Image (tube, helix red, strand yellow):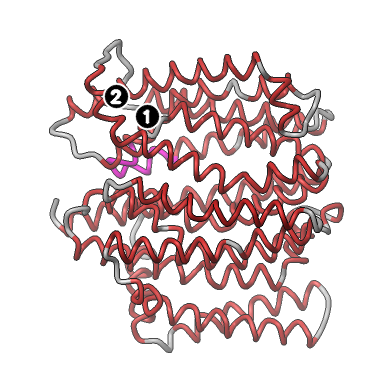
Amino acid sequence: MKENQLGNKILNAAKWSSVTEIAAKLVMPLTNMVLARLIAPEAFGVVATVTMIASFADMFTDAGFQKYLVQHEFKDEREKHRYANVAFLTNFAISILIWGIIVIFSEQIAVLVGNQGLGIVIAIACVQLPITAFSSIQMALYRRDFDFKTLFLVRMFSLFIPVFLTIPLAFLGLSYWSLIIGTIFMQLSNAVILTIKSKWKPKWFYDVRILKDMLSFSIWSMIEAISIWLTTWIDTFIIASILSEYFLGIYKTSTTMVNALMSIVTASTVPVLFSTLSRLQNNTEQFNRIYFKIQRIVSILVFPLGIGVYLYSDLATQILLGSQWSEASDVIGIWALTSSIMIVFGHFCSEVYRAKGRPKLSFLAQVLHLVVLVPVCIISSKYGFWVLVYARSWIRMEFILVHFIIMKFAIGFPILKTFRNVFPTAISAVTMGFVGYFLQKLNEGILWEFCSIIICVLFYFVLLTLFPNMRKEMMGIGKKLIPNRVK
């Protein structure tokens, strides 16, 4: 694939991926703002534990085939579709099996995660497992082909399901059931629309030799996914087991809101980055250039976003969640700050490992982080909720260090360049943070806070333009994205 052709594909994919995430983040916060005022934090805590179980089971149903289909180079369309069919049938069979196991042992699972008596909730919520098996393979094929326009249309349809289903059910007093039913119907809409629009349709074709070929990559990808799940959910499990559903609801809703905000940037770039790097896995120069370009662009938005949310966490909590969530403010602030650092320096490293066809390295990174994360979470939880929150947030810096070591010695990646690459955005964002802090001391009130936020944004971008390379970068992005009609 020629460089110009690839560049156009990347740009077009990034446009649609970005439009999707921006639209999602306009609809989802409004939905959550309404739900947070209708549903108590305890109900969100119940949903968090259900989601934890469903996400764990979902790893086995996918079996890592999605990443294989994106990363692997096939001889032709026929071979690609044959592999897709084997992946689909395997996914679907495993999902039915796991759902059956969850239904049988639902009460025991509920006790294990600290939600005794809610076995029926877990059993019904996990019906989404076989449903997602219908959409996961199509989604992988769309991403492989950089067809993010279709994924945009599918995502837009599913985003309005909470508006027309979840919120009305919450008004009727269905509490956590409204969230669970809404999630099931979102997954169902994705499966139906993607299956109808996909060029590839499931067929009764199966080849064990193809399965063995995929498993050589996918087994490690699945093991990696399990380690990622542990990294993501170990804190939730500990809070659910040791503390109350109230604190679990506060914690998980806060971190989810921050992650949703940050994913405006990350979710629109990661799928495109992985697809692009996979195509360039044998061209080191282009591979590194694309990585650094994406990292630099992401840092332009993520650094000021993290610092800004940290400074104005009280305002963000009041607007997004309401008065009954006031305790969430500190969680939102510290999680946003550490997330911005984690995203810029560590988030994309796993995409490098997978794109290079070396998921074992991502698994190694997760394990090296878990051996520190788990003891820190267990020990800090004994000293109360807030000690756990701050310990869990800052321990992610150790994860960045692990990634740096692996990227340097296993991949041969120029680590020092990652710091030089984002130096202008880091300095500008930190300076903006000091300006915002002093502006908050000058006056009080919501109106002044909004005014100070605008001042901070303007100050940040003006400061950023003082760096010639960043000025050129932003002008280049503007010329490509603003004047052109999205095709």
- Image point 19% across, 65% down: which residue? 285
Foreground residue, 193 or 43?
Answer: 43
- Residue 350: give x, y in percent of width and height: 39, 53
Give the answer, above or below, for where 277 lies relative to 447: above
Q: Which mark is residue 200?
A: 2
Give the answer, above or below, for where 309 lies relative to 420: above
- Residue 283: give x, y in percent of width and height: 17, 58
Judged by depth in the image, the label closer to the viewer, 1 or 2, is: 1
- Image point 42% across, 36% down: which residue? 222
Q: Which residue is mark 1?
A: 137
Q: Is residue 430 left or right of residue 59?
A: right
On whether residue 145 falls in the magenta region, the answer is yes
The tag earlier along the polypeptide, 1 or 2, is: 1
Foreground residue, 50 or 37?
Answer: 50
On whether residue 328 falls in the magenta region, the answer is no
Q: Are the residues at dot 1 and dot 2 in contact (C-beta closer than 8 Å)?
A: yes
What is the span of residues highlighted in magenta in the rendered image?
A: 142-152
